[in-house]
Amino acid sequence: MSPRPVTVGIAVRTLDTDVSDERTALEAIGAKLKVFQITDQASLIDGLRDVDVVLNRAYTRFDASVLSQMERCRAIVQPSTGYDVIDVDAATEHGIVVINLPFQCIDEVVNHALALILALNRKLVTARAQVRAGIWNPRGLLPIGPIAGETLGLLGFGNIARETGRRAQIFNLNVVAYDPFVDPSVARALNVELLGLDDVLRRSDYISCHLPLNPKTYHAVGEAQFRLMKPSAIFVNTARGKVVDEPALVRALQDGWIAAAGLDVLEQEPPDPANPLLHMENVIVTPHLAGTSNATPPRQRRQAIESLVAYVKGERPAGLVNPSAWDTAQALLHA
C-alpha cells in the first residue's frame, strides 16, 4: 500500500488570504493543501486534526494545551524570526518540531538597531525640535559621544546580533557581546569579545538587545541590569518587549541611570497612550517596524514555502528550533 500524501495546513485569519504560491510549490511535490480559518482555540485544534504540518500565518498561539491535542500534526512553521507564540518545550515533549525563519529580515533589523543608536547619539529628535522652535545652539546639545572608539554591547549573539556587530565595526565601534550559548571562537572570528552579562553592561556605551523571548529571558533586563550601565549609556531593543522590565526602564531613564533608549518593541503592543516611554524626550519608540521593508513580505513568504517543502521532503530546514524532536516528527510523518 502506497503511503498517504502529506497534508500541509495553513492557518489564516481570513479565508481570502492568498495561498497560490504555496499551493503551486506543494502540489509540485505531491502534497495536499488545506487552508483553515482561526477564530479561537477550538477552531485551531479542529483545523489541525487532518494536517501533518502547519504554517502559522494566523500568528496564533500554540500553548501546551493546544500542543497536547496535536495527534497528527508534527511540525509548526512560524513565518517570522521570533517564535515566542509557541511553547517550544511542550512541542519538543510531544515530538513536534518548531521551524522559524531566522534569515528573513536580518538586514532590516540590523539597520533599524543602528539607526536608533545613531539617532539617539546625534540627538536628532531633540535637534529637530529645537530648530523648529527657532533655537540654533549645537553646543547646547552636548554631551554627544564620538561613536568611534566607543563600545557597543550586544545582548544575545545570534544571526541578527552578529551582523549588527559587523556593521557597527564600520563606525569604528568596539564590540562586545553576551551569549552563554555561543562558542567564544565564533565571536573571535568576527572580532567580537564574549563577556559575562555584567561586564557587557558595565563596559558598553551603547547596548543593543537581541535576546529571544522565552521563560528564561522574560524581564532579563531589569533594575539590576540598568543600574550597572553607564549614566551616558544608550539602550536599544529590537527583539521582544517582554525581555525588558518596562517600569524599571522608565525609572532608569527618569532617574538618570542611563541616558536614552530606542525601542521598536514594548511589553504591550499597541501601547497604552499613557505609557511614559511615549512621552520622554530621550526615548524613540517605533511600532515594531524593525523587520519591515518592501522586500520583507515576499522574502518571508518564499522562505516559509522553502521550509514547508524541505520538511515534507525530509530535509532539515534552516530554522529548526528544536532539532531533538526531528527524528520523532519525521517517523510519525512517514508512518
Image: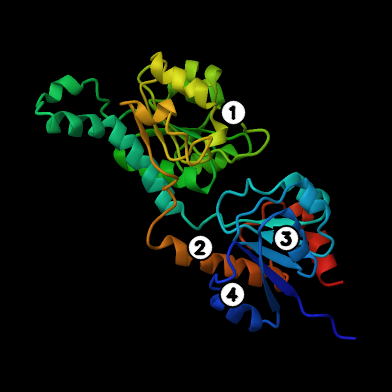
- Residue 215 horizontal/vertical position (percent): 68, 35
Ranked by sequence position, the earlier of labels 2 and 4 is: 4
Task: Kindly identify which residue carries mark 3.
Answer: 43
Q: Of the residues shown, which amino acid type is indicated by label 1?
A: Ala
Residue 22 got which mark? 4
Q: Quadrant of the N terminus?
A: bottom right
Furthest-top residue in this view = 255
Residue at label 1? 220
Disc 2 designates what residue?
A: 300
Nearer to us: label 1 or label 4: 4
Residue, x 55% and y 38% (percent of image)? 211
Q: Quadrant of residue 5?
A: bottom right
SS label for mark 4: helix
Looking at the image, which residue is at 59% across and 28% down?
Answer: 220
Q: Please state if 184 lies on the left or on the right of 232 as rendered.
A: right
Per the model, the C-alpha gap separating discs 2 and 4 is 12 Å
The crowd level at tag 3 (other Cα within 10 Å; few <14, some 14-19, many 20+) is few
Q: How is the image coloured?
A: rainbow
Q: Earlier in the sequence, mark 2 or mark 1?
A: 1
